[in-house]
Image: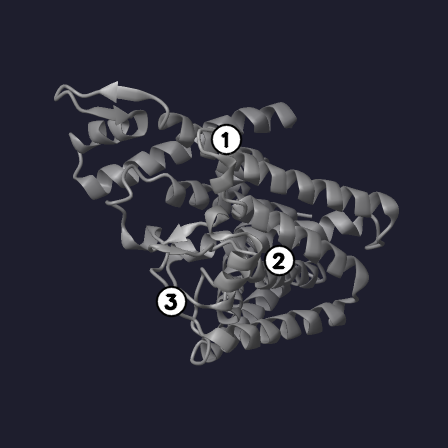
Amino acid sequence: MNRYLALDAMRGLTIAAMILVNTPGDWSHVYAPLLHSHWHGLTATDLVFPFFLFIIGSAMFFAFKKVNYQANAHTINAILKRSSIIFVLGLFLNAFPFNEPIESLRIMGVLQRIALCYLLAAFIILKLKQHQINIFIALLLIIYWAILAINGYQITGNLVQQVDLAVLGKNHMYVLQGYHFDPEGLLSSLPGVASMLIGFQVTKLLTQSTNPTQGIKKLLVTGVILLVLGTLWSVLLPINKSLWTSSYVLISSAFACFVLAIFVLFVDVYQQKKLIYPLLVYGLNPLFIYVVAWLWDECYRLIQLTLPSGEIVTLNRYLYLQLTQWFEPLNASLLYAILHVGLFWLISLILYKKIL
């Protein structure tokens, strides 16, 4: 089914965007859309992570279809094993290059959130029927709203922060804007499950379409409904990526539907598979490329070079400064990120050709 290619292309786009926003030449010189919102609000960068959860939910539709959505012992063991591996891998990335005491190791992170969301979403999918999943998503988002409302939506004192402080401890949390607050915390992972389940449900809706045009219409209608609901909800509940608010879940999922509709249009209607080939390359090994990109950037920081002025800088800083000789700082920083998107695409291409 060609719609598999549309989903693979969206996954590739998400990985490319993640590398782009995570690897600027200089964090002091980044175009606003390539930064997360300061607190409340939404930027293009704020859509990258929920897109990834959406796509994982989509992949779960096809993976669990092979076992007819039955929670047998083999499937349960596979879920537990995969989520554990992803979580431990996230801890490994946080610890690398192992020069900080374990007492200050950050416990949560992007991969850790993916692991928790995958674990919970998988069991929900295997235990509930389709209409029950929709009800579960709605109840989860409403309950999470009620929980957040108890202490409010400010950066400090909110319940997301309080739960992490109580369970993880401040020494094992991220520091955001001077506060111990983890944007990939425990409590805020719950609405992340909703993002994943929406991806699952949307994929089921898409595959049930009789033709690509009908599938596109379903995606657009679903996206508009989610966008309207999220926008109306945002009047009472701010759109906030760090808190992963319910309004943020709906709006980010709406944009995911729109992007997926565009890829279905290219793949199934216009038959432009060659145009999405670069994204298919990126989408084949997303977890591996994410880890490689993280470690690559961290290794840059371990290598020190001396400038003609005598200043000692890390390799990533040195490379960025070379680009500033030809481009002004903002564009040099962007070009640095783009070059790394290209670099990791070449690595993906090698893997792509070996696997296929």
Q: Residue at x 40, y 65 (%)?
A: 156
| Disc 3 versus disc 1: nearer the observer | 3
Image height check: is 94 above or below 122? above
Residue contact at pointers 3 and 1, CB within 8 angstroms: no
Report the residue marked by disc 1: 292
Which amino acid, by three-letter code, is at mark 1?
Val
| Disc 2 versus disc 3: nearer the observer | 3
Neighbourhood count class around disc 3 (C-alpha, 10 Å): few under 14, some 14–19, many 20 upward? some
Q: Residue at x 47, y 52 (%)?
A: 170
Label 3 sits on a secondary structure element that is loop
Image height check: is 109 above or below 204? above
| Label located before the other in sequence (3 or 1) | 3
Label 1 sits on a secondary structure element that is helix
- Name the residue nearer the viewer: 40 or 281: 40
Rendered location of residue 108, percent (x, y): 54, 48
Image height check: is 133 above or below 31? below
| Label located before the other in sequence (2 or 3) | 3
Q: Is residue 250 left or right of residue 205?
A: left
Rendered location of residue 97, percent (x, y): 46, 28
Q: Quadrant of residue 126?
A: bottom right
Numbered tag placed on residue 40 in the rendering: 3
Report the residue marked by disc 2: 196
- Name the residue nearer the viewer: 170 or 150: 170
Q: Residue at x 54, y 42 (%)?
A: 273
As drawn, the residue found furthest toward the left would be 309
Neighbourhood count class around disc 2 (C-alpha, 10 Å): few under 14, some 14–19, many 20 upward? many
- Name the residue nearer the viewer: 231 or 121: 121
Label 2 sits on a secondary structure element that is helix
Q: Which quadrant: the C terminus?
A: top right
Q: How far apart are marks 2 and 3 (CA)?
A: 22 Å
Q: Which residue is drawn at 61% across and 67% down?
A: 218
Which amino acid, by three-letter code, is at mark 2?
Met
